[in-house]
Amino acid sequence: MAVQRVVFDDLEIGEIGIQLDDKEPDEVIGWALETFGDRIAVVTAFQAEGCVVLDMACRIRPDVRVITVDSGRLPQETYSFIDTVKAKYPEIRLEVLFPDYREVESMVRRHRMDLFYDSVPLRLLCCHIRKVRPLLRALQQLDAWFTGLRREQWASRANIKKVELDHDHGGIVKVNPLADWTKEEVWDYIRANALPYHPLYDKGYTSIGCAPCTRPIRPGEDDRMGRWWWETNAPKECGIHCPIETGGFEHEVEAILGSAHHHSMVEAKTNGRE
Ligand code: SF4
């Protein structure tokens, strides 16, 4: 049976966005679940915001689709926490995405395991291979996705809308129900509803990603300063939520994808598949 896609254009989503922009997050989530059905998923790394969106979505649809990326470099606490979340919401349809092993092998062969410490382009390369590309594959199968983005998190997020077209991912709809929430509102919701939260928050972390690229913040530091803390003048983004362009990075991506493809062709021939 052909999949029925739900597609909007800029004008339509602009009008819907205006109507929904002053609505409460659960109303926005309700609209999106009703509109997109199984063609929308909560995409989360299980930080505080993602847990709030997931909780609100589960109250409306307990078997909501949930997508997360296992980069292969996550802290053990994240793996344990994913099990905690699954126990709390047993009906969610959780999809854990992994990077393509050929691309990871090619990247490590060209550079080293901890290449991200060597330069900003190599850090972006690692994020691209380990996180962005797996997610891209999943987004191609969706018409919309929920995020936990908030405007006050970082300059690159200041203009997000609660509902917008995501031109970086094929024009699907990006739903950011917490766009206008403050950090305090997020934590008030977590406490008021006794939600489980990632255990590293209690150790001084304020934004949690891969183990080698995340540390607790120091007093007075911005919340996202614990991410890629050794970098100066680079966006605190992995490329999932905004396109990042640097000359060296694109060149490296092409080299790795070319090489990974070459190895898979050789593998296929060796296995008699071609
Ligand atoms: S956060 Fe660090 S380890 Fe994780 S994908 Fe990005 S560069 Fe690689």
Image: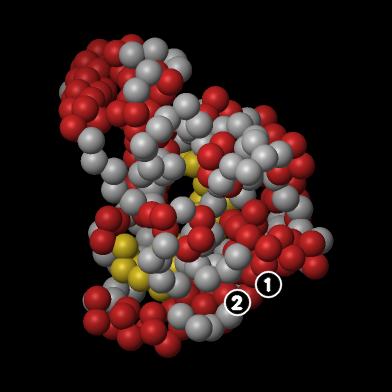
Residue 27 percent coordinates (x, y): 56, 81
Q: Is residue 186 left or right of residue 136?
A: right
Q: Is residue 126 above or below residue 169?
A: above
Q: Is residue 138 left or right of residue 153?
A: left
Name the residue carrying label 2: 26
Task: Point out the image quarter for the C terminus.
Answer: top left
Residue 267 percent coordinates (x, y): 27, 17
Question: Which of the numbered marks, if any, corresponds to residue 78?
Answer: none
| Residue type (three-letter) at the residue carrying disc 1 | Arg
Q: Earlier in the sequence, mark 2 or mark 1?
A: 2
Q: Are marks 2 and 1 in contact (CB under 8 Å)?
A: yes
What residue is rendered at 31% in x and 63% in y?
Answer: 166
The image quadrant that residue 103 belongs to is top left
The image quadrant that residue 184 belongs to is bottom right
Q: Which of 176 and 133 lies nearest the eye of the viewer?
A: 176
Name the residue carrying label 1: 59
Q: Is residue 195 left or right of residue 149?
A: right
SS at circle 1: helix
Q: Which of 28 and 2 lies nearest the eye of the viewer?
A: 28
| Residue type (three-letter) at the residue carrying disc 2 | Asp
Check mark 2 vs ligand 1: CB closer than 8 Å? yes or no: no
Q: Is disc 2 surrounded by few (<14), some (14 to 19) or many (20+) residues within 10 Å?
A: some
How far apart marks 2 and 1 lie (CA) works out to: 9 Å
Residue 192 percent coordinates (x, y): 80, 67
Q: Is disc 1 surrounded by few (<14), some (14 to 19) or many (20+) residues within 10 Å?
A: few
Q: Is residue 110 visible?
A: yes
Task: Point out the image quarter for the N terminus.
Answer: bottom left
What residue is rendered at 57% in x and 75% in y?
Answer: 25
SS at circle 2: helix
What residue is rendered at 47% in x and 75% in y?
Answer: 32
Q: Which of 100 and 223 lies nearest the eye of the viewer?
A: 223
